[in-house]
Amino acid sequence: MIIIPAVDIKNGKCVQLVQGKPGTEQVVIDNPVEVALNWQEKGARMLHLIDLDGAFGDNRRNQELIANMVEEVSIPIEMGGGIRSKEDATKLLDTGIERVILGTLAMENPDIVTELSKEFASERVMVALDSKDNQVVVKGWTEKTSKTVPQMGSIMEEVGAGSILFTNVDYEGLLEGFQVDPLLKLLEAVDIPVVYAGGVSSLDDLKVLSDTDVYGVVIGSALYRGKIDFEEALKL
């Protein structure tokens, strides 16, 4: 299991939101590139970059910052936020993002997952499955679909997704732990790698995850607010 620090950017800064809601910034750091380099120096093997401005409607504001980060950082970066077309995803992959994270776009047009996987290799295409009350939610966690996470995971694997990012929205950003059962059900349903996010706030939480077949875990608020020491976490 690899531990992937989250670098969420908004208005050119590194931030952490509570349950993804604008205006709930808990952490604000001026230079996201320096943040990324710091995680790299501490031993991170991958970074999880989310363009919150893109997710909220402005996918051009941070273009220069993203390009600078790709140039400065030598470890792979997976990125989501504001990817609303195949062209958006292609541009990011062409500029050096290792893996794009597709959310609502993949749900509404699964053929794009297939096309990108064929063009760039499935390993570079991740689909985000966000769960609220055990149902997949889209459009910034505001609309529920009719599918459970295991059901949607199977569909996305069939159309060519190389991996899945599973976020349990019920616990995201609250630093109160999480329930492992929904993750276990997803792991039973798919054969592709799964990365988990949501509520991980202690070394004990990481131990629970390390006893599963999950490929990796994204940690944001717990790292920035000192709940988890990254270097201690790596020792697990």
Image (tube, rainbow, N blue to C red):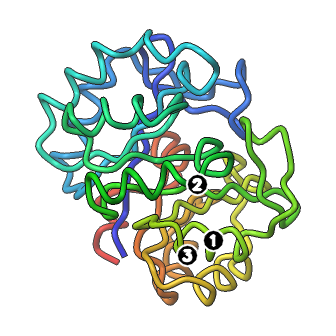
Q: In terms of image quadrants, where is residue 1?
A: bottom left
231 above or below 141?
below
54 above or below 48?
above
Please rate how many residues cluster around mark 1, counting C-alpha atoms within 10 Å: few if below 14, some from 14 to 19, many from 20. Answer: some
For the residues marked 2 and 3, what is the alpha-carbon distance in whole angstroms?
A: 36 Å
The residue depicted at 47 percent of the width and 39 percent of the height is 80
Residue 28 at what x, y percent from top left? 50, 21
> In the image shown, does 8 or 116 lie closer to the viewer?
116
Of pointers 1 and 3, the one earlier in the residue sequence? 1
Q: In terms of image quadrants, where is residue 202?
A: bottom right
Circle 3: element type = helix
Residue 233 at what x, y percent from top left? 37, 66
The quadrant in which the C terminus is found is: bottom left
Residue 95 appears left or right of 1: left
Circle 1: element type = helix
* Residue underneath mark 1: 155
Residue 152 at what x, y percent from top left? 69, 68
Whether the residues at callouts 1 and 3 have beta carbons within 8 Å, the answer is no
* Residue underneath mark 2: 110
For the residues marked 1 and 2, what is the alpha-carbon distance in whole angstroms?
A: 9 Å
* Residue underneath mark 3: 204
Residue 218 appears left or right of 173: left
The kind of residue on which mark 2 rests is Pro
Select label 2 or label 3 by which is in front: 2
